[in-house]
């Protein structure tokens, strides 16, 4: 499956619409369009900018065109009675705001580093709040480029100024997570947005160490020799690097602005039960603990994050990763903690002929929400992604709205 930039396919190898006046009113938001009723829950929409996936649809449009498109996504969220937009503001070690750390993203103008003449993140925050929506700024910590040629980067790009920070892998470029200076730099770059804008949350997705690519090696041996002496093996050292990134970012967000939440949306399988008796009853080809070196369960137990939004991108009954088995596993994992569970939903699969038969039924997603009612730990859902919510070719999102989103609600605090 193509998820937030391209690699989860390997990992998965494995009727009525509301009007703008019905939008959810977030507390304290000036200009919120109407009252919200019912139990608070997250109703989120990812808007991906990487490779112009959702927005902007093409690079090089005028500032007015891009702004109009962006506002169109926000209005769509209101129309669908959603209350949260997860806006990708740092897709590939670049920025959709005037950052002193990294160049302007090429998704805006087609040329990395070229000023687009406006502030997309600032506009997204302002216009989302005007509509009573929360705005979660979505950052990718380590991905530098979706190509492998450093020469294509802006001349002032930090990856060109510090080539020793960068590793090629799988046709892409990544910052090396094992270098402490890298870890500090990417935090600094993201925290600049936290300082500048009244965002509601910092949001990360599933990219830490990259997804495995058959026949290739992520060549951090030299870094491991330099920094990994205290660890039993490279995998333990890599997990510690990711843990440090999460823990340090959590602490630093609170130092900058205590009201900003921190959420992460990992791949949906921590470990398979065959690998670890505490894992889920799944047989997924990728496990975050082992393959991405991301111990998502520990982040919950240590309270480093405010919410977790696992990508449960499979249908009910899918053999290797059954939604109906993963949902209770995640509910149990957050139970008794202060970490909220938001369920990531694969709207983009609805009606895709390449997907299993259940996805051809527009009611599949609605059944997910019906099942989630049995788990009070599930505080809402987020849908990938904005394009599919706008177009809704099979009516799957309309079915969700008709069955479950009859009234606007606030997100939980």
Image (spheres, rainbow, N blue to C red):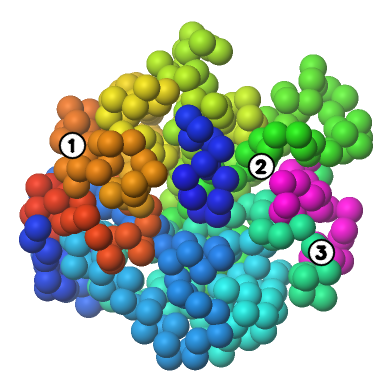
Q: Tell me if residue 412 can be seen.
A: no
Q: Which residue is mark 1?
A: 367
Q: In the rendered image of this protein, does residue 165 appear above or below residue 368?
A: below
Residue 148 spot, x, y in % from top left: 77, 58
User: Which badge, 1 or 3, comes first in the chain's sequence?
Assistant: 3
Q: Position of residue 192 (x, y in %)?
A: 61, 66
Query: Residue 353 vs residue 398: left or right?
Result: right
Distance of label 1 from label 3 (alpha carbons): 45 Å
Residue 178 in the image: state x and y as whole percent: 78, 40
Residue closer to the observer: 153 or 328: 153
Name which residue lies at 77% across and 74% down.
154
Picture quadrant where residue 357 is located: top left
Q: Position of residue 162 (x, y in %)?
A: 86, 60
Q: Residues within 10 Å of mark 3 (few under 14, many from 20)?
A: some
Mark sitting on residue 210: 2
Residue stretch in magenta: 158-178
């Amino acid at each position: 499956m193509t998820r937030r930039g391209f690699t989860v396919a390997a990992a998965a190898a494995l009727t009525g619409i509301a009007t703008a006046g019905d939008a959810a009113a977030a507390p304290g938001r000036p200009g919120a369009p109407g009252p919200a009723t019912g139990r608070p829950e997250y109703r989120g929409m990812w808007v991906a900018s990487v490779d112009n996936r959702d927005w902007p649809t093409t690079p090089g449009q005028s500032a007015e065109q891009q702004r109009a498109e962006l506002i169109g996504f926000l209005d769509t969220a209101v129309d669908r009675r959603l209350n949260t937009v997860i806006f990708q503001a740092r897709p590939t070690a670049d920025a959709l705001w005037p950052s002193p750390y990294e160049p302007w993203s090429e998704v805006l103008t087609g040329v990395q580093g070229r000023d687009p003449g406006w502030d997309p993140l600032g506009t997204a925050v302002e216009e989302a709040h005007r509509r009573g929506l929360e705005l979660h700024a979505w950052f990718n910590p380590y991905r530098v480029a979706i190509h492998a040629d450093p020469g294509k980067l802006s001349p002032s790009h930090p990856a060109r100024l510090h080539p020793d920070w960068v590793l090629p892998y799988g046709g892409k470029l990544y910052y090396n997570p094992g270098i402490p200076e890298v870890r500090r730099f990417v935090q600094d770059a993201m925290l600049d947005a936290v300082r500048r804008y009244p965002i509601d949350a910092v949001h990360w997705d599933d990219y830490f160490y990259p997804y495995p690519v058959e026949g290739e090696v992520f060549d951090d041996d030299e870094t491991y020799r330099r920094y990994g002496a205290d660890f039993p093996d490279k995998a333990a050292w890599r997990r510690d690097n990711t843990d440090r990134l999460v823990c340090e970012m959590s602490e630093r967000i609170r130092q900058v602005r205590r009201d900003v939440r921190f959420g992460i949306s990992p791949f949906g399988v921590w470990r398979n039960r065959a690998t670890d008796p505490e894992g889920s009853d799944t047989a997924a080809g990728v496990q975050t603990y082992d393959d991405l070196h991301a111990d998502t369960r520990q982040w919950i137990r240590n309270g480093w994050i405010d919410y977790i939004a696992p990508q449960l991108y499979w249908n009910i009954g899918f053999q290797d990763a059954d939604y109906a088995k993963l949902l209770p596993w995640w509910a149990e994992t957050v139970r008794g903690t202060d970490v909220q569970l938001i369920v990531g939903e694969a709207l983009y699969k609805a009606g895709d002929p390449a997907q299993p038969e259940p996805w051809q039924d527009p009611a599949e997603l609605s059944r997910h929400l019906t099942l989630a009612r049995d788990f009070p730990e599930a505080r809402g859902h987020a849908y990938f992604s904005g394009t599919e919510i706008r177009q809704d070719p099979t009516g799957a999102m309309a079915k969700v709205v008709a069955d479950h989103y009859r009234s606007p609600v606030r997100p939980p605090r």
